[in-house]
Image (cartoon, rainbow, N blue to C red):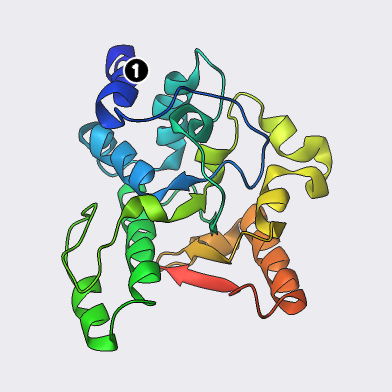
């Protein structure tokens, strides 16, 4: 996309977003399912079957270049609820659909009967709200997603400058507000071939062992 199309995203795609502002790396830099879906909807004619490598280089970095912030800081960050583990080579369309379906289900599970829940989740499309026994707003569920939550202009710093315990990944996942790790997975289970994903799985199981009552462990989103 051209620079004009990219910069139009904030004005048209998220017209009510606050002014871009920096915040500490880690759990305060999540994005909502709504913001994620709006990113896809605004650029889907360019994205097609492309993956997160394309999103980061062709959309995220040009969008955030003037402020040199993370995408989350650019559109208005949220406190983490879920940590997302994924393979950047997964088609972005599949990634967004998986996260949005998880957001819908996470809200409905506490409000709908099993029959209503099944009917709602089986519906197609990615609406902001669904007409069910309860109202689902994708603004209510937030996710820490490395490509969107990390400052792509300061990657070494986000990785802890070589110290994983100081990395933004670890700080977000260990946060008491992070209730589970959501792994976006495909039929080939490619996230399990990536070193960082394996690190995230390890830290997920360590946290689950220590806090079994307040952390749901590893959840799979397809």
Q: Residues within 10 Å of mark 1 (few under 14, many from 20)?
A: some
Out of 185 and 213, give the one closest to the viewer.
213
Residue 55 versus residue 105 in the image, above or below: above
Q: Residue tagged by mark 1?
A: 7
Q: Is residue 19 left or right of residue 109?
A: right
Is residue 32 placed above or below 70 in the rendered structure?
A: below
Tell me which residue sits at (68%, 35%) in the image.
Answer: 24
Residue at image point 31% right, 31% down:
14
* Residue 206 appears in the rendering: yes
Which sits in the foreground, 17 or 155?
A: 17
Reply above or below: 65 against 188: above
| Quadrant in which the N terminus appears | top left
Residue 36 position by quadrant: top left
Residue 166 x/y as whole percent: 80, 44
Measuring from the top left, give residue 112's x and y in whole percent: 29, 80
Q: Nearer the viewer, residue 28 or 173?
A: 28
In this rendering, the answer to whether 215 lies above or below 57 is below
Question: Residue at (26%, 79%) from the top-left corner?
Answer: 117
Would you say 73 lies left or right of 174 here?
left
Q: Is residue 222 visible?
A: no
Which residue: 71% across, 67% down?
A: 202
| SS for dot 1 | helix
């Amino acid at each position: 996309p051209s620079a004009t199309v990219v910069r139009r995203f904030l004005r048209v795609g998220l017209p009510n977003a606050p002014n871009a502002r920096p915040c500490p790396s880690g759990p305060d830099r999540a994005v909502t399912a709504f913001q994620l879906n709006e990113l896809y909807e605004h650029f889907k004619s360019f994205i097609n079957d492309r993956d997160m490598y394309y999103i980061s280089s062709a959309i995220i970095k040009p969008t955030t270049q003037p402020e040199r912030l993370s995408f989350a800081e650019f559109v208005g960050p949220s406190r983490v609820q879920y940590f997302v583990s994924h393979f950047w080579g997964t088609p972005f369309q599949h990634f967004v659909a998986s996260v949005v379906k998880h957001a819908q289900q996470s809200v409905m599970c506490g409000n709908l009967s099993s029959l209503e829940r099944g009917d709602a989740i089986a519906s197609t499309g990615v609406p902001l709200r669904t007409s069910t026994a309860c109202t689902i707003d994708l603004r209510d569920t937030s996710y820490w997603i490395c490509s969107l939550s990390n400052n792509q202009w300061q990657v070494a710093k986000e990785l802890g400058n070589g110290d994983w315990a100081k990395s933004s990944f670890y700080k977000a996942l260990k946060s008491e507000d992070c209730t589970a790790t959501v792994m976006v997975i495909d039929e080939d289970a490619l996230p399990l071939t990536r070193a960082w994903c394996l690190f995230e799985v390890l830290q997920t199981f360590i946290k689950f062992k220590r806090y079994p009552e307040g952390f749901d462990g590893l959840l799979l989103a397809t």
